[in-house]
Structure formats: C-alpha cells, structure tokens
Image (tube, rainbow, N blue to C red):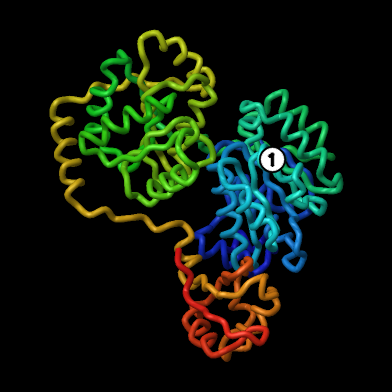
Amino acid sequence: MENFCKFNISKRILLSLEKLGYKNPTEVQKEVIPLVLKNKDIIVQSETGSGKTASFGIPICEKIQIENNIIQSLVITPTRELCVQIKEDMSNIGRFKKVRCAAIFGKQTFSSQVRELKQRVHVVVGTPGRILDHMDRGTINLTEIKYLVIDEADEMMNMGFIEQVTNIINKLPEKRVTMLFSATMSEQVNLLCKKYMKEAITININSEKPITERIEDYYYIVEGKDKFDLLQKVIYKELPKSSIIFCNTRNNVDTLFNLLKDRGFSCISIHGGMLQEERLEAIRRFSRGEFTFLIATDIASRGIDIADITHVINYDMPFEKENYVHRIGRTGRAESNGKAISFLTPNQLRFLNEIEVYINRSVKLGEIPTIDEIEMGKKFFQGKSKNPIKLKREKNFELNKNISKIYINAGKKKKIRNIDIVGTISSIEGVNAEDIGIIDIQDNFSYVDILNGKASLVIEELKDRNMKGKKIRCEKAKK
C-alpha cells in the first residue's frame, strides 16, 4: 500500500484499497491518478486488463465532495455488463468515504432508476441511450458534473454510439475534467478528443509484457460438423480450471451449452437474448467458480473482469480481428499467463494471417490430443464432478466482512432524512457517525450500511428507540 500512499489520497480510500487487495499501482494507474488529481484532461490508450477502472475510479472517489448532494461524475460505457462492473468497482473504492454510485442502462425498469437517482448519488455510470433518456425526461441532473469519463471509446464508436455520446457531451457543463480511455485510437475517437478536450495529455501504456505475449495462442483446422468432437478432445487435453468459450450467435451459444451440459460439463451461458438480470447472475456465478465453462457471445469480450480464467476458446472465430484480441484478453490478466485456442474452418485460414499481422506474432498449430490425454482428461472431469465445488471469494469479501445493511421501516413519507438516521444511530453508546455508511431512504423504508461489525448492536438498541417521535422497526436487511 505504500505506493498508493504516495498519491496523497485520503485514509478512507486507502483503507478500501487495502481491503480490496490492491498492493502496487499498475502502469496506467501510476500515470493517470496524479493527472486526474490535478484536474487534467487525459487521453489514455491502454490494453484490456491493465487496471484502468481503478486509474480513474480512485482519483474521482478522492475528489468527490460527499456533503454535496448532487451528481459530480459521469462515466459513459458501451455495454450493460461493463456499466454494472464499473459501478461496483467505484462503489467498492469509495465505500468507506460513503461515495454513492448508480448504474443506469437499458432493459432495466426506468422507474427504479429514477427512484435511485432521487437519492444522494455522486457518480453515475451509464450506457449512452439510457443516459440520454434520463436527460430528455429531466430525471437526471448533470449540471454540476466535474468529471466525465468516456470508457472503451473505440467500442462505443464501433457500436454506433458516436451521435449519442456527442449529444450527451454537448449538454454537460464546459468546465469539467474529461477522460477518454480506448484500446485503439480510430479517426472517430481522435476527432472526439479534439472537439471536446482541452490541452489533453496523451498516455500510451505499453505493458512490459503485452497481453498477447502473456497468452499462448493455438489454432486447429476443423470442419464445422466436427467442431464439437474436437472441442471435447481439447478440453480433455487442456484441463481448463476456468474457461470462456466464444460463439458468434445466440443460437450457437444455446446449442453448444446444451451439448456440453448433456455430457456432464459444468457450464453456464450468456448472450444478448437473455434478460439483464440473468446475464449478470450468470457472470456472478461463473466468477465465483460455480461453473468451469462460460459459453458466450461477444458481449463477454469487453470489460468483464473475472480472475483466473485459464483458457479462452474461440469455438467460432470472431468476425473482426479486434474482437480476437478482446476475446483472448479475458485470460492472461494481471500479468498472469493464459491460453487461447481457436477453431478455424479451412476457408478461414486467410483471416488467421490478418490476425497474426495485427497482433505481431504467429499463432501456433495445435497438436491433436492423443488417446491417452483424452482418457486421462475424462477421468479428471469425472472425479471433479464428484467433488464439492470450492467457491472463490468475491473480490470485495474483505471489504464487506464487517459491513451489514439494516432495514428500517420508515422513509420519506414519514419525513425521515439522512440527518435523522445518523442522529438516532450515533446516539447509541459505542456507535458514532464513522460507523454509518451509505443511507438509502425510500418512500416507506430505509436501508443503512453499518460498518465495523456494529450492526447487531445497532439493531438491538433501535428496538427501544423512536425516530422523529415515532416507534420504528429495525432488522438485518434481506438480500
């Protein structure tokens, strides 16, 4: 943690970083954090898995004025999954400072987002379309934005969001800090920077060991009808601990998922045809280690940060070479090594040459698994299916260990305010304002984060107390 101390950030942010397991800043964090703390516009070109979310999340959480009950930072992202992940990462970083973050994206009820935006919210992370919806309906106030982040800018342009992004920017205060992050710098991205940024400092992070060098990539030539047979053989040879298998279409994902599941493989799937809650739940369960395989379309190739993925398998080759890099970038993260395996039909060999030029290295031809390797692999997976699954701890486990959410049956309709809740709880002997985290006051009830393991004490004491002269009921919140 010493290296993070050098940034002169507050003890509360440092405590969150310590609980989250941050030790040494990555290269992008070393470059970006000091500049954002000095309110400089920045353009950052950095590969996937470089730690860029924390590079802007840490200084933004540091600069947020908690007592100012207004949105101070807006982060624009291309996908819902990335939106949720950034929101969670920034919430974790700002947990002890009580920075409140909200995620707004499509396919989630508008009314629930409006209700959340009426709370004290300091940071909003959103997809372009849903941000514009709120702006057009007047349900979000961005007049005091101090920090704007455009994340995965190249993907934003590829997905056709350029007009929506510029519409959002045109409605924001001119006096702000603007940060743009992109894996590649296209002409559209460069034009966006020139138009909306002031004396921006460009940062190009070249990892000492680029992600393509941390990953061994192999290819197999196979006819479409023989793919599944080869996939099973490759799995038995490689024995992946955790793997994402990419397909190009929803139908292919569903078909492959059913084939693998029917043969006893531990798997779950994700694609754009699923409900958002289902997609987020699938990612959460896969990241916890409940399943060995995640079968996915390209929605899982951007921004999803899951630790310890050992193998990425391109069951279908991507349509664009850039997507090849984003897919294989799900492994080999945080300076660890990984393996990428691609299945090519004979007529796709030409595309492989384009990929090799793009990544500036050759992809090796894989060796067909031997009968012995296949038999040993079968025994391994049969044994694995009989053993109980050991789930991974979530990355915020230590952070949340002594934090509990409590429920109070009083809200806005009883004229309850933050100050009433803080005053009542901090009057309990042994509890002070530092033990009270984020407060969420809704119409008929409220949720309060209680820190430092004091939730049981608070719940017990509130049984015999009134709030604004009225008896209240308090209990531990249900998940």
Quadrant of image for the C terminus:
bottom left
Residue 141: image x %, image y %? 77, 52
Residue 126: image x %, image y %? 64, 45
Q: Is residue 227 left or right of residue 325?
A: left
Residue position marked by numbered label 1 in the rendering: 150
Q: Please rate how many residues cluster around mark 1, counting C-alpha atoms within 10 Å: few if below 14, some from 14 to 19, many from 20.
A: many
**Relative depth, front residue between 103 and 221:** 103
Quadrant of image for the N terminus:
bottom right
Residue 150: image x %, image y %? 69, 40
Residue at the image point whose x is 81% and y is 31% from the top:
194
SS for callout 1: strand
Q: Reply above or below: 437 against 187.
A: below
Amino acid type of disc 1?
Answer: Ile
Q: Is residue 26 left or right of residue 353?
A: right
Q: Quadrant of residue 133?
A: top right
Count of marks overlaid on the render: 1
Q: Quadrant of residue 269?
A: top left
